[in-house]
Structure formats: structure tokens, C-alpha cells
Amino acid sequence: MRPTDTRDPDYFHKVVDCQWACPAHTPVPEYIRLVSAGRYDAAYMVNWWSNVFPGVLGRTCDRPCEPACRRSRVEEGNGEKPQPVAICRLKRVAADHKGEVAAQMPKPRPRNGKRVACVGGGPASMTVARDLALAGYQVTVFESDPKPGGFMRSQVPRFRLPESVIDEECGFITELGVEFRGGTRIGSLKDLLAQGWDAVFVGSGAPRARDLDLPGRKEAAAHIHLGIDWLASVSFGHVEKIGRRVIVLGGGNTAMDCCRSARRLGGEEVKVIVRSGFDEMKASPWEKEDAMHEGIPILNYHVPKTFEHEQGRLVAMTFELVRAEFDGNGRRTLVPTGAPDVRVECDDVLVAVGQENAFPWIERDIGLEFDRWGLPVLGAASLQSTLPRVFFGGDAAFGPKNIIWAVAHGHEAAVSIDKFLQGEDVNERPPPMVTLVSQKMGIHEWSYDNEITREQRQVVPWVAKELALSSIKVEVELGFDAQAACKEAARCLNCDAQTVFLKDACIECDACVDICPMDCITFTTNADEAELRKRLSAPALNLSQDLYVSDHVKTGRVMVKDEDVCLHCGLCAERCPTGAWDMQKFLLQTTKAGPGCRSKTTLGAAA
Amino acid sequence: MTYLAKPKLHHPSLAQNKVCYTRRDYEGRVSTLCAGCGHDSISAAIIQACWEMDVEPHRVAKMSGIGCSSKTPDYFLGNSHGFNTVHGRMPSVLTGANLANRSLLYLGVSGDGDSASIGIGQFAHVMRRGVNMVYILENNGVYGLTKGQFSATADQGSKSKKGAINTESPIDTISLALQMGATFVARGFSGDKKQLVPIIKAAIAHKGAAFIDVISPCVTFNNHAGSTKSYDYVREHNEAVNRVDFIPTRQEIVVDYAEGQVIEVEQHDGTVLLLRKLHRDYDPHDKVGAMNYITKHQAEGEVVTGLLYVDNDAGDLHEHLNTIDAPLNTLGAKQLSPGMAALEKINQRLR
Ligand SMILES: Cc1cc2nc3c(=O)[nH]c(=O)nc-3n(C[C@H](O)[C@H](O)[C@H](O)COP(=O)(O)OP(=O)(O)OC[C@H]3O[C@@H](n4cnc5c(N)ncnc54)[C@H](O)[C@@H]3O)c2cc1C
Ligand SMILES: Cc1ncc(C[n+]2csc(CCOP(=O)(O)OP(=O)(O)O)c2C)c(N)n1
Ligand code: SF4
Ligand code: SF4
Ligand code: SF4
Ligand SMILES: [Mg+2]
């Protein structure tokens, strides 16, 4: 193998599994250390720069970082149930425990005279607005709802996300001088463009619910509701109760929010009924657990067949029973079991079987192209549409995803808009800002806590079930207290404390190899990657994790380190007599809109 | 040294051996030696060898003297018996323990100061007696623990860290052990575990006095230019006469070697050593030849390593003394003091 090029920022970035997996590339271990030091304000600000909504995301994030977390891999085969660090809930700790952070908010650059319009007030638009306002743009956000937040406010139920959190975090953005025009629906993109905006960002989400066109749908319509419409009505206080027996159709997170909301609005017998098997449901495992914890059964392999009604009133639904069969290619089909159909009585049905994009307000004759799925044609990285002034992000760009993806798109779109309005090529993406600094403080002293705790993942406390179910406004999770947060934070392995190897200093004494608890390090003759992976002290079977390979050391061998289950304990560096190993903190921040994202040539020309 | 204990977490693929221990179970306390000390690598090699040999930790006695090397038994086999004797006296304590309980595996760990200076008398006699043991001498050419004075194994003309030249003639512990009657004699290098681990395994399987001299650089006091026990010097001058493959039973020999390339040595317990020849003429069964070879090549500045001598039919102290099979410490008062009638019988024979 060729020696690893650690100057490529991607190399060490990948080692910080959580940050790599986070769409917005939040420097996770950096804020976790701040949380354990009780420096909640600083931890909040680290998050705020990266993901804009730490309080919201600390409660609701889809957390792609957690399945990626190294902690689960190192606990594999070590007795306990392997569990990732509670990265998401530690973010909430920073948000809940912080003091007054207003003073730490940055000041926008002087206005540069350019005006940008954002359509929709969801996380994607609000991120664009924040980044561009800071860079000196005059930004106006148009939102048909009265307040900003998008689906965070209209869809995510209050028992998971109190409104005060949304108010505060959207407030930080409007405070920067962003103009928010609530209650203003944009009816025509053509008209908007005619108003002379320098650029337009479309963050209008994916607002249309799929329906189920089954016999009885029309007749029983009064008691059949589309999930996202119903949830919005609940959020805005237009709906305050539901029937005693409720069926929720669908297996995604919307279905989970529907059923739990129904439980709080008078639904005593609430059931979730899905076509697929339980394990294939789209909802996150923790959402399913939470629903079941609230006494909501989930019936799988039930395909909805009819809505039964009597005198124009919904009385029940029927379902065909199926089972999963897999063909040679592992493709699944649902085949009827032949058992008699099942009838489930009900007073109301909530249909949560998916969402689609809809752009009725965008004219098709203005040069903005859509693909055959009805999605805008965009530059994959720039998010620029075929109308160069118009950019997309969030659910409006590639279909429904989640809040953190909307934020990540927002940052990228803001960079594109900034470059576009500064006359630059939007396809030339700015490299991230990276620092790599030794953490050595003394002979065996590091600026991070390198002792490895065996603490198990802390459980987030909940309010009593009766209280939780009594009102839709009672937040279910209480969040970690300082003590639990500290214990949980200690589980983080500080994966950003990189093991950096200087081959010229190595005397091949084997001290690092001998001390490494995880058998990460091997000195061996070089070979191709497949061969090397077999030949190491412990086999390197996780192909998604890189091998760190040095150039030849004195004996002609190479040092190979399997990054997979390194504890970042620094014992290799403590044991090395010559300092050939060092623990160096890798801090990566993505480049945001503003002078930093512009190419050197333009900067030079401006100066 | 390191202040943190080595985390107990281990690689998910870490395997158990036949006696249900992982390699990590053979570790001891975290080492307090200097970072990079060769002795720590030898500890790691001992751990690896014991794990591979399915050694039961409670059936091992680690004996040592005084020195950095003699401290190491604290850093491996944390669940075994141990005795840290006074300086240079490990061989006699080991001999006594072995006489009392022949059923344990005796692991003697010593340094060049401990064995070749203050303890040279004991060293000579424990080899002569053929005590069944694995004697590992961690040879760095200095008294590490007392800050790097030349030891008796330092080569004449080699230079100390401060620049002083050693004027005295060195003791070659390998030649001494051969002369004194050790039946398994090998030399290794702490920086080459591929060679060292199989040698330790073979020594464990050997019944009789097994001696391994391991060149083990002292990074703090003897790893500079002008030293003949530094990592660089040993790597440059290392001449391995053979490579040992340790095979637990004859049935398991699957490797096919070209004729004349390999020597098979079947030990007492049925285990087999395959010696891949690296030097065509080297015969590890020929003691006089071995002594000549070593003397000649060492005079030329080579560090001769490998399994240098092995006696297939070695015996041990218990055999020489014709003791009973049962460990003496298991005998009860009745057997140890059989009564007047038995005494009378013995006396009769002497009349
Ligand atoms: C029930 C439910 C629960 C969810 N729970 C989570 C969760 O826990 N965690 C998570 O990460 N994600 C969750 N999501 C997904 C998440 O809400 C969205 O992916 C995210 O909000 C998308 O952000 P966005 O900025 O692209 O658009 P949105 O948040 O959808 O915001 C778009 C906004 O644009 C407005 N708008 C649309 N058209 C116009 C127009 N023409 N003029 C003016 N305004 C307009 C809309 O009113 C809306 O407020 C959930 C989704 C649903 C449906
Ligand atoms: C009776 C006695 N004399 C002298 C000493 C001082 N002393 C301690 S260790 C040592 C030499 C150790 O050298 P070596 O056996 O080579 O061990 P190393 O530290 O080099 O591994 C000496 C002379 C002592 N502890 N006891
Ligand atoms: S252990 Fe910490 S730094 Fe490593 S992946 Fe998990 S949260 Fe991130
Ligand atoms: S930091 Fe070094 S010693 Fe610790 S697990 Fe990683 S490679 Fe091994
Ligand atoms: S002084 Fe030398 S022998 Fe002793 S621990 Fe340090 S390096 Fe090893
Ligand atoms: Mg010594």
C-alpha cells in the first residue's frame, strides 16, 4: 500500500466517525469534552456554528452519527450490550444547561447591498438566512405559517419538542437582521423573481401527504385524516381531540408521531398497522420503542383493504394478512397467507404512508427544469437549479429527509449563493478549515481525558407515563442532569485525538504494539491492502475503516494501524520512547458562506 | 512508565485458547519500565508464548532477582505464582522450589548484571544441575536499574552513554551455559518476536535446563552509537542460524520443506521443533561444533541468534536424583515419616 496521505483532510475526518457521518459535520468530540467540563455555553456555540438548531436537534435529530460511533464497535465482544455514545442527548444538555449566549452570537458583516429571498421558513431556509446574514446579505424569509420553523414547528409534536426551543433558536437568526415575513405564501416564482432579488432559495419542503385510495375512503372521509395535515392542525391548536379507537397506517416516523399524539388527545386504543415486517419499518428503532412504551401495539404484515362505514360513519378497517418472501436476489415480495381478512374496529384513521414534493407555485415555463420524479434538476454539490439565480435545499431538493440534512443543505446553498453573487464558480467547493495540534502536556499528560471508562450508556429519564399522556404539551424526555451528562460524556473516546506517526523517529522497539489494548498496530512487510488486512496483529475486517500505513521504517517494514477500534487512549504515544507517536487534535470546520469560502484569486483581486 | 492501567477492553476478535483464556488474561500489571525498554517486548513474547501453549497461569512460578529485567514478572502472568529474590540468587530459590514441587512450570527471569555479575556462581550451578526450567536472561549490557554501569556482558571496546570505553573482557552467557551443561540454549532479540515466541514455546516444552539469552536494548542507558546492544547495532549484526517452528504434536506437521532445509527435533513430550536452517552447516545437536561456531562468529562481530543447541535426550535434576513422581510438597506426614519399622529397615541396610 502507498503511505497514507494525512494531509488530505478526509483521512483524519473519517477517523472521527460521528463527525464524518453528521451531514453538517458537527465537531462532536469537541463539544462532548466541553459538556463534561461543564462549559455548556461553549459546547452550545460549537454546535450552533455547525448545526444551527442544537436545542431542536438535541431532541429530535435522526442522529446518523450514533450508528457510526466507534464506541459501539469497541464494546463489541466485551461483555456488555454495545451502545454508541448518546451524542444527540448530550447536544440537548448543552442547549438546556447553557446560560445567556446572546452575547456570544457573532455580529453580521456590514451589508453588501445584495438581497436574497428564501421561500419557506424551515430549517433549510433558516440556515441559509443565518449564514448569508452573517456574510452581509439582506435576507427575507417568506413563510405561509405565522412563525418560523417549518416542519419543526408544524409537524414535530410538542411532547418531543417544546415551542420555546424553536422560538429561541429561530430568534437567534432573526436577531441577526433577517426579515421574517410570516403568513405570506409565495404563489408564483415568476412573480418573485420579477421583484429583483439577487438570488432565491427554495426551502419549501415536501408538504404533500400520500393518500390511500381504498373502498370506503370517500364515504368515511370525515374520520380519515392525512397524518401530516392532522399533525399540523394539532400543532396549531385546531384539533384538540380524536376518537377512542384509532388506527394509524404507516411505519415511518410520521406514523409514530401520529399514534403518540392520538394517545394524548383521547385515543385510548391506538394501534399502528403496517404492511411490512416490524424490522423493515422506516421509523427509527427508538421511535418504535417509545411508541410501544406508551402502550401502542404495532401490527405488522397487514395490508389495508377497505374502510368500513355505516351510515356515512367510519366503523372499522379490513386488512389482508401477508408474509414476506424473498427471491434469489434478496428482493422482498409480500404474499397473501390465505388466512381470513382481519377486521379492526375504529373511530378514526390517520394515514401516514409517505410524503411527496409539490411545487404548484413554480411555473414550468420559466427555465427551471424538473426531473421525471417532479424534483428540481440541481447541481449535486452546489444545489443550484437550471435557473442560475435559484437554489434549493432541504426536503424540497431531493425529497423528504430530516432536519440535519436540511441544515447541511442550507450551509452548502449559502456558500453557493455567496460565490454566485461574488461572481465565482459555484462548482468549485471550498475546502474545510482544519487544524492538527499536539495534545501533549507533559510526559504522560494529555489535554484530554485518555482514561477509558467502562460506564454503560446512560438512560434518559422520562416524566411519569400518566403525566406524559395527560397533555400533548408535556415534554416526555427530561434530559440528562449534569452528573449523568458527565458520565455519558466520559464514554466518548475522543476520536479526534488522532494517532499521528512520524516514521523517521521510530526505532522499532515494539512498545506501541505491545501496549495497544486493541491490537491496532503492526509492523510488517508491505503488501496490497487485501493482503495486509489479513496479516495484522488482529484481522482488519471492517472495510469501511481505513488502514493508516507509513512509509518504510529502518528495517524496510511499514507501520500499519487499523483505525477501526482504536480507543484513542494514547498509550502508544505514552510508550513510545522517541515521540514517533503523538496524539494530535484534529479540528475540522466546514467552510461557511463569507470571505472564507471564496477562491483565492477573487480575494486577491478584491484586496 | 504509564500511569493509566491498560484498558481491559480488547479487540472484538480476541480468541480464547484451549484452557479458555485470552491472550490478555496472561498480562500483568502495567509496566513501570522506561518507554521503549526491550524488556517489555520480552514480557509480551512470554505472554504470547504462554497463551499459545495453553499454559494454565496457576501452574506457573515466576522467579527473578534484582534489576529492571527482574522486575518484569510483575508485568506478565498476573495470576501466576512469583518470587522476587535478592540480587543474583534467583537460581537457588528456583532450584529449591522446583525440588519441592516439580509439577509447576518454572520461569526464571534475570538480567545480565543479575546473572553474569553478582549471580554468576548460581547461574553456573543451576545449569549444571539441569533444573527443569525456562531461564530467560534479558541482556542489555548494563545495570539498567542502577543507571547504566557496564555489566559483565558488555563487549570490550563498546562505549557507554557518557563516552567511557569498556576495557574488560565480556562473559558470553551462551557459551557459559553450554559449558555448564544446559540442554537447550538459544539466543533471541527483543525486537524480533517472530523468532523469540517460538523459541520460548520450545523452551517451555523442553524438559531440562532451557536457557534463552535475549538481547534487550536499554533505551535509556545503552541505545546510542558505540553500544553493541542497541536496536540499530543488533539489527545490523544479527545472524540467525535457524528459525524455529514449534509444533505441538507430530501429527500436526503439515509444512513441506525441501530436503536438507529443515531439522526435526522431537522432544520428550512428543512435541516437535522444526528448525529451518538459515546456515547450511549449523547443527544444533553438535555441542562442540556449536561452541566453536559461536566463538568464531562472535569474534567477527556477529550476534548469533536462533536455537543454538538442543539435547533430545535431556534429563533433569529430579531424574538425576531419582525422586518420586509425586511433588514432594504433596507428601503427607505419614509418607515423610514412615515410622520406626521403616527406619530400622534402612539402618539394617547400612550395617
Ligand atoms: C411528522 C413528522 C415528524 C418529523 N420528525 C422529525 C424528527 O424528529 N427529526 C428530524 O430530523 N426530522 C423530522 N421530520 C422531517 C423534518 O421535519 C423535515 O425533513 C425538515 O423539516 C425539512 O426542512 P425544510 O427546511 O426542507 O422544510 P420544512 O421544514 O418542511 O419547511 C418548509 C416550510 O415552507 C413553507 N412553505 C412551503 N411552500 C411555501 C410557499 N409557497 N410559500 C411560503 N412558504 C411555503 C411551509 O409552510 C413550511 O413551513 C419529521 C417530519 C414529519 C412529517
Ligand atoms: C546485593 C545487591 N547488590 C547490588 C545491588 C544494586 N543493584 C540493583 S540492580 C543491579 C544491577 C541490575 O543489572 P541487570 O541484572 O543487568 O538488570 P537490568 O536493570 O539491566 O535489567 C544492581 C547492581 C542490589 N540491589 N543488591
Ligand atoms: S466515541 Fe466520541 S468521538 Fe468517537 S465516534 Fe463516538 S461520539 Fe464520536
Ligand atoms: S491510541 Fe494507540 S494504544 Fe490506544 S488503542 Fe489507539 S493505537 Fe492502540
Ligand atoms: S533503565 Fe534501561 S533496562 Fe531499565 S527500564 Fe529503562 S530502558 Fe529498561
Ligand atoms: Mg542489564
Image (cartoon, coloured by chain):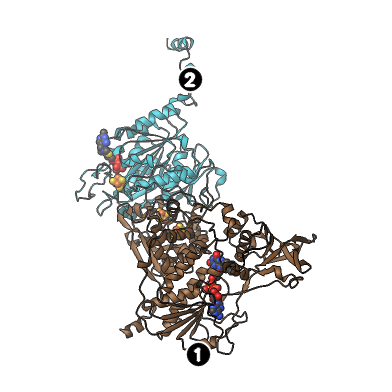
Residue A299 drawn at (x, y percent)? 69, 59
Which labelled disc corresponds to residue B332? 2
Name the chain letter of the residue that bears numbered label 2. B
Q: Position of residue B267 (x, y in %)?
A: 49, 39
Disc 2 versus disc 1: nearer the observer = 1
Residue identified by numbered label 1: A194
- The disc labelled 1 sits on which kind of residue? Ala
The location of residue B55, given as percent across then percent down, is 49, 39
In the displayed structure image, the side of residue A136 where residue B327 appears, left or right: right
Q: Is residue A246 visible?
A: yes
Q: Nearer the viewer, residue A254 or A328?
A: A254
Residue A498 lies in quadrant: bottom left
Q: Is mark 2 within 8 Å of ligand 2?
A: no
Instruction: State whether residue B227 is above or below residue A559.
Output: above
In brown, which chain?
A
Q: Is residue B140 visible?
A: no
Which quarter of the figure has residue A12?
bottom left
Q: Is residue A535 left or right of residue B290?
A: right
Give SS at disc 1: helix
Give the residue at x 20% y 50%.
Answer: B162
Q: Nearer the viewer, residue A314 or A462?
A: A314
Chain B's shade in the image? cyan
Residues A360 and A513: in front is: A360
Mark 2 vs mark 1, CA separation in Å:
108 Å
The x, y position of residue A23, in whole percent, is 49, 69
What residue type is disc 2 on?
Gly
The 10 Å Cα crowd at callout 1, few under 14, some 14 to 19, many 20 or more, is few
